[in-house]
Amino acid sequence: MPIERNMNFCDFQLSGETLRILSTGALWWPAEATLVVSDLHLCKSERVARRSGQMLPPYETRDTLARLDSDVLATKPARVICLGDSFDDDAAREGLGDAETLWISRMQAGREWVWIAGNHDPAPVDLGGTAKSELLAGPLTFRHIATPEQGEISGHYHPKARLALGGKMVSRPCCLHDGRHAILPAYGTYTGGLDWTSPALASLLAPGACAILTGRQPCAVPVPQRARA
C-alpha cells in the first residue's frame, strides 16, 4: 500500500488520494494542503491531578503544542483537522493557560481549523476554529471513532506496534490502514497505546492491513495475521 518512503515520512493511498504519515504521527494530505492530528489529550496532567491527586510533570501540553507547531510550520497547511480527544476530558479546557491559548490562536491564524468531537471531550467552541462531529472532504471522511465506511480517517484507539526491528524490540505508535480506512496514532505526549494485535483493532482491519510506524524513520510493515483473525 505505501508508495513512497523517506527518512521523515511514509506515503500510502486511500480512496485515490495520496496521504503522508509524518515522523510525529501527523497525517499530511498534500492535494488539499491539510494537516490531520488525533488525540492531543491536552491538559492530561491537570485532569489526573483533579481526579486522583496524582501529580504529573505539567509540561505535556506545551510539548504537544510544540510538535504541532513544528508540523504546521513545516507543512504550511491551509487546513488543520484535530480528530477528537483534543482535551483529556470535558473540563480540561479550563486548565489551558493563557500562553497555550495564544499559542493555539497563533497556529490557527490564516487557515481553516476544525475540531472534531471525541469521546473524551466535546469539540471546543471557544478556542477558535470550527467544531464538528465529523467532516467530509472530497472522498474522505474525518471522524473520531472508526466505522466500516470506505475512505475514513479516524483516531481514538492510539494504535501501537511492538516488534523486532533492526535487531531489537521496539514499540512505536503507528497508523493502521487497509485500503478502506486509516486509524491514526495518538499525537499527545501523555498518551498510552493499544497493541496492534488487539481484538478491537482486529475487528476493524481487512486482510493485507499495513502499519506505518512513527519515529525518526517512519516505516511500513504488515500487520500480523493474528491481528486480523
Image (cartoon, rainbow, N blue to C red):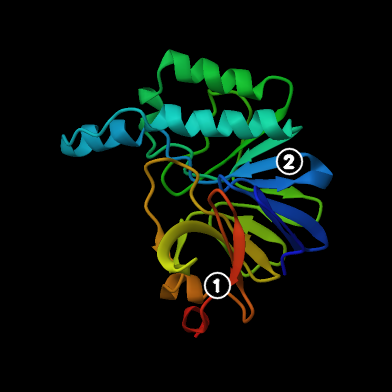
Give the CA separation, mark 2 to mark 1.
Answer: 25 Å
Q: Is residue 77 visible?
A: yes
* Residue 224: x %, y % from top left: 51, 79
At horizontal 60% and vertical 23% (from top left) the residue drawn is 128
Q: Foreground: 50 or 198?
A: 198
Locate residue 171 relative to residue 113 in the image: left or right: left
Q: Nearer the viewer, mark 2 or mark 1?
A: 2
Q: How many marks?
A: 2
Q: Which mark is residue 185?
A: none
Lateral position of residue 60 relative to residue 148, left or right: left
Kind of element beneath mark 2:
strand
- Residue 141, picture quadrant: bottom right
Kindly indicate whether the residue at mark 1 contacts the one at mark 2 (C-beta within 8 angstroms): no
Name which residue type carries label 1: Leu
Q: Position of residue 1 (x, y in %)?
A: 72, 69
What amino acid does circle 2 point to?
Thr
